Structures are given as C-alpha cells and as structure tokens.
Image (spheres, helix red, strand yellow):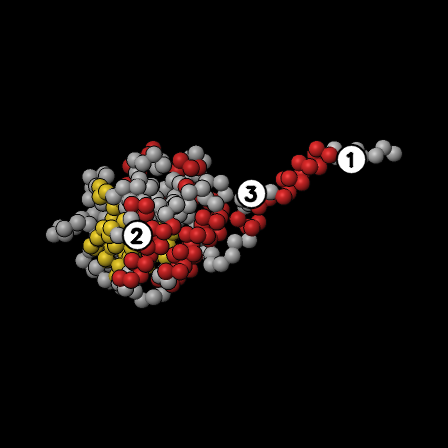
Amino acid sequence: MKRRPSLSPIIMLGAAALLSGCERFEYHPYSVGLKGNHDINNKTIALLENSGLTTPFKFAFITDTQGSLDETAEALDNITARGDIDFIIHGGDMTDFGLPKEYLWGRDQLENCGLPYLTVIGNHDCLGNGEDTFNYLFGPENFSLNVGPAHIVCLNTVALEYDYSKPVPDFNFLEIDCETVKEINKVYPDSLTHTIVAMHSRPYDEQFNNNVAKPFNHTLEQYPGMKEEEGEERAKSFCINGHNHSTDVSDIFNNGILYYQCANMGKRTFFVFTITEEGYDYEVVEF
C-alpha cells in the first residue's frame, strides 16, 4: 500500500501562518455571529405604526456617515438634545467597505441615541458581503410604513453595485406598494395624503439605473400627494437622498416632486422634516 506523502515543511509553515492570521480576514456575517439587535427596520416599522404618532411629527435625516464616527456621535447628541425628533432615517453608506465591524459601529451609535431609526442601503454598504450584513442587521432593502397621514417608502437605488443583475429600483415592489396605498385610501378615504420616498442615490446619479429614470418618476407620481394641488405652496410629498456629499434641492423632472439631498456627515449637516396635516417644513442643521 502506498503511503500518502507528508506535507513539506514549507507548506506546513505556510498553513500555520495562514491559520495564525485568520483574525485579519472578514467572514460572511453569519459565520462571525453578529451580536445585538438585528432585523431593525422591521422592528422600527412595527413600533412606529403602533405608536399612534400623528401630525405634526418630526424626523431627522442623516446620511453617508462612513468614516465619520465622531461627527455622527455629535449629530446624534444634537438630535436627541432637541427633544422634538420622533425618529431618524439613515440614507445609506453607513460603511466604507461593507465590513461587519463598520456596520456594528454605525448600528451601536444609533442604538445608543435611544430614538427609533430606519436605514436604507448605500453603494458602499454593498461591498464584499455588505448586502448580507445589511439584510441581517436591518432587513429587506425595500420596505414601507405608515406614520399618521404619511406613507414612507425606503428603497435600494444603487443599481451599479449589482451590475444590473437584479431589479434596482424594484418596480414590482413599488407597484404592489402603491396599489396597497390606493386600496387603503378606498377603505379609509384620504387617510394617506403624504408620501416620503427615501433612497441613497437619486435619478441621474451614476449609481442609479438611468435607463429607467423616467419610468421611476412616473411610478412615484402615482403615490398620494406627489402632485401639487391648487392653492398649495408645494406638493405634500417629496424624496430624500444622500450619496453626493452635498446639500441640494432639485425638481429633477420639473413636475413638482422635490428631491432633498443631504450632505455627508463629514460636512456636519443633517435635515429635520416636520410633517403637518397641510404639508411639511424642513430645516438644514449645521453643527
């Protein structure tokens, strides 16, 4: 019987070096056993929808916090100290490289502030196994909820990260969601009169699938409050996004749907929106 040849000393040394350096490698999130709160978006949806919260209510929008832990901590201190913010929406790019430890840093900062929060996925969050980590910690990449008269839609819009291999934006989700809202308004007339659409990358960014920018706009137009009514200063509904690291307000399609773009956290800026029965107000907070 032939004997299996033994490993050479060089191979043995190489294997030992690899094993001793295992802590340098990032694993799939489930293999490292991420601890602490997870499925957070779904928990926050249940909390907010059952809270009885109605107008007026306020939420803060922060985005692109990657690499800005100190600024994020200061912003969250500012938000909680106000005492008038009901919840927070994070506009994506919580991480630079999609690493589990980056996600945990961002999650723990938001957890410690004590306010309910929702998070959308950004392009940096998708790197490596980042999408899997996002799904575990926060849940689906497309979701919606109702708070008072406002229907809030949170979307994955970073198509470039998937090389157009999956539907981003997901029109199937949007069409079903919009029809659900219409059915609610049939049963309870005018119960949902505002729509807020949160995304990381907006139409005509390089991340967005701009082959479908116009159909995307057409789909959003079907939601309540997207069209300005006679006598209104502006439509009751709007979109919010991050990604471009600058503050901007644009009517991209010249149809009254405003896109409020917030600068990255490194520029020490966040938005506060106040939703009223008649519409909404917003402020740019620089700290």
Measuring 73% from the left and 34% from the top, which residue is drawn there? 9
**Which residue sits at x=40%, y=35%?**
160
Give the foreground label among 1 and 2: 1
Label 3 vs 1, first from the N-terminus: 1
Mark 2, secondary structure of its residue: strand
Give, as a three-letter code, the residue at label 3. Answer: Phe
Question: Which residue: 36% across, 36% down?
Answer: 207
Disc 1 crowd, CA 10 A, few/some/many (<14, 14-19, 20+): few
Q: Is residue 16 left or right of residue 223?
A: right
In the rendering, at what x and y percent does residue 112 appear?
40, 60
Q: Which mark is residue 164?
A: none
Residue type beneath disc 1: Ser
> Picture quarter containing residue 5?
top right
Q: Quadrant of the N terminus?
A: top right
Report the Cα–Cα distance between label 3 and label 1. 28 Å
- What residue sits right under mark 1 in the picture? 6
Residue under pointer 2: 61
Outermost residue to the left:
231
Q: What amino acid does circle 2 point to?
A: Phe
Q: Identify the secondary structure beneath mark 3.
A: loop
Residue 22 appearing in the image: yes
Q: Looking at the picture, how far across and down is residue 132, in whole percent?
A: 49, 46
Q: Earlier in the sequence, mark 1 or mark 2?
A: 1
Which of disc 2 and disc 3 is earlier in sequence? 3
Q: Secondary structure at mark 1?
A: loop
Tell me: residue 51, above or below residue 124.
below
Residue 167 location in percent, x, y?
A: 41, 39
Residue 25 disc label: 3
Decide which of 274, 5 is in the foreground and name it.
Answer: 5
